Image (spheres, rainbow, N blue to C red):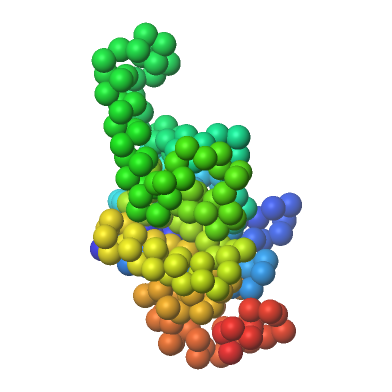
Amino acid sequence: MALLEVANLGLSFSGLQVIQKLSFAVEQGTIASLIGPNGAGKTSVFNCLTGFYRPDSGRIDFNGHSVIRRKPHKITRAGMARTFQNLRLFKSMTVLENVKSGMHCRTSTGALGAVLQTGSQRREEALITSVSEECLAFVGLLEQKDRRADTLAYGDQRRVEWARALATKPKLLLLDEPAAGLNFDEKKELITLILRIRDELGITILLIEHDMGLVMKVSEMITVIDYGAKIAEGTAENVQNNPKVIEAYLGSEDGEDVL
């Protein structure tokens, strides 16, 4: 069953067509990738999925419901979480506080409850802390929970972002360039973590990634776009040998990985 369905998606800026009649689906319980050369429109697709951009045309259905025109925080609350290519941590806050901020979409007591310190507010805060610590333990950072986020190594800051996304209790996790800036060993650990998120937590994953080695190792379905249009779709083996894919990547740094 498709957890995410995108049909005939279109987006333009000042007359420039960024996404062109794009259609693809992500089946529940799978790991899928959206790839393409630089400037192909991948991040624009993610921005449409998560409510940061409003597409000009097409349909986006998540878990059986349209998310077109829904605000980002409501899409997150519905179960679609996202990480970004560039770190977006609260650097002056602790690691734990950063992860707890991800559960904001699940809180219900409101500002008055926080001020009055009601019983329900205290129970909710205890739950938020417990879930956040579980997420930090899952990514291997529980012992660092009281450190300021900006004192961690870059790879560990990435893990804080993943833990924060997991704290939203997503059904679908969108990873935007998760391997960016990571060294070889950290990328190996990332592959293991992506598989664990799907296998142990049951979370469906859709990722954008330039590291073709990583994409080919974790993806069960790959959609390839160029100039905002789909040029290929299929398994890693099928996509890697597709002439249109090879042509799209020729002359770019990515081409060396694909070919």
- Quarter of the figure with residue 116: top left
**Pick the front one: 136 or 67:** 136
Residue 120 horizontal/vertical position (percent): 27, 18
| Whether residue 60 is situated above or below residue 206 in the rendered picture | above
- Quarter of the figure with residue 139: bottom left
Quadrant of the drawing holding the C terminus: bottom right
Q: Which residue is painted at 32% across and 57% down in the image?
A: 203
| Whether residue 87 is situated above or below residue 5 in the rendered picture | above
Q: Which residue is painted at 39% across and 46% down in the image?
A: 142
From this viewpoint, is residue 73 visible?
A: no
Residue 243 horizontal/vertical position (percent): 56, 90
| Whether residue 23 is situated above or below residue 52 in the rendered picture | below
From this viewpoint, is residue 206 visible?
A: yes
Q: Which residue is painted at 43% across and 87% down in the image?
A: 237
Residue 233 horizontal/vertical position (percent): 45, 77
The answer to whether residue 40 is left or right of residue 236 is right
**Pick the front one: 187 or 76:** 187
The answer to whether residue 32 is left or right of residue 34 is left
**Pick the front one: 241 or 160:** 160
Residue 118 horizontal/vertical position (percent): 30, 12
Residue ranking furthest to the front: 143
Quadrant of the drawing holding the N terminus: bottom left
Q: Which residue is painted at 64% across and 73% down in the image?
A: 37
